Image (spheres, helix red, strand yellow):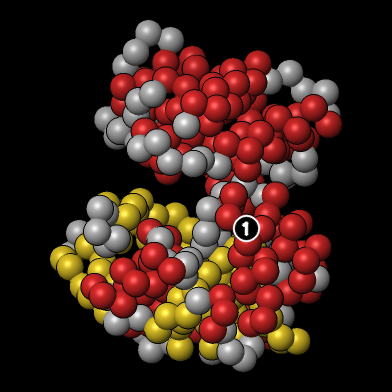
Amino acid sequence: MRILMAGAGATGGYFGARLAQAGQDVTFLVRERRYQQLQASGLVLQTPQGTETLKPQLAQANSLTGHYDLIIVTVKSFALDQVLEDIAPAVGPETLIMPILNGLRHIATLQQHFGEDKVIGGLCKINATLGDNGEVIQMTPLHQLYYGALDGHNDARLQRVDAALRDCQVDTRFSDNIMDELWEKWLLLSTLGAVCCLARGNTQQILTSRGGEALLQGVFSEILSVITAEGYQTRPAATARILELLSDPATPMTSSMYRDLTQGFDIEADQVIGDLLLRAKRHSLATPLLNAVDVNLQVYLQQR
């Protein structure tokens, strides 16, 4: 299977590297700066098991040739518009596009641009970041990759995707209910991002602060009410596990949005929090805590 990995940051770099190491034909679509960095130093993975370096196949938007069987989009959500243009030459009649982005807005955007039949569901769970020299740092052993048809019908095309991905040295989950997985991932990451960005700390610091547990539970409840109104078929055991994970004071957690914010980078405020508020408004839901988070993030963006 010919695979194009749009992006070689922490997510794209890690999962693309594992696919390449498993023998898949993987090309990384990157910008000039990242292209030069990877050409010079290779793609470096720092994992709990050690350091690995591989020489990746690289391409830039103006050098893409031929169609790809699978395009995995791993950029930040605010970079999606440019990526739509960049990947267009690589999309053929049989191409499938699997976005691994935060939130859900990107799915409709990709479907409108390339057609509903080309977009499949995808998400990952990994604690990873880029180091100062562009190395991919996997901070914990967690490396899960979920995928499946958005309508739950995993046909022969999806079976081919599964065959390519399942032996790539990561924990793969071929889901026949990927939409619920996507809703639950959004519930987790938006709650985590909201409380960490608002409180400017990790979950351990928040939960051991006066009122911190109430803040986390309040944000969680607001977000759950929004996604349920939008069509999430609540799975009580799954949502209970998410809340339990977030509420463990022994395990300090932060979100990628919080890490970006503390480093002064652009953040996915509209995609992770703003979109929830738009959906809440559609159902006349009161979300005062989410509104406070959104104002906080907007002020941050104004001050950058």
Q: Is residue 219 above or below residue 214?
A: below
Nearer to the camera, 63 or 230:
63
Which residue in the protein does label 1 denote? Answer: 80
Nearer to the camera, 206 or 128:
128
- Secondary structure beneath label 1: helix
Nearer to the camera, 94 or 167:
94
User: Residue at position x 56%, y 66% from top?
Assistant: 73
User: Residue at position x 77%, y 23% from top?
Assistant: 285
User: Residue at position x 75%, y 29% from top?
Assistant: 280
In this view, the residue farthest toward the left is: 50
Q: Disc 1 marks which amino acid?
A: Leu
> Horizontal and vertical percent for residue 122?
58, 63
Q: Is residue 126 left or right of residue 63?
A: left
In this view, the residue farthest toward the top is: 210
Q: Is residue 120 visible?
A: no
Q: Is residue 253 left or right of residue 289?
A: left
Q: Is residue 201 above or below residue 85?
A: above
Q: Is residue 50 above or below residue 181?
A: below
Q: Is residue 137 above or below residue 175?
A: above
Q: Is residue 287 visible?
A: yes
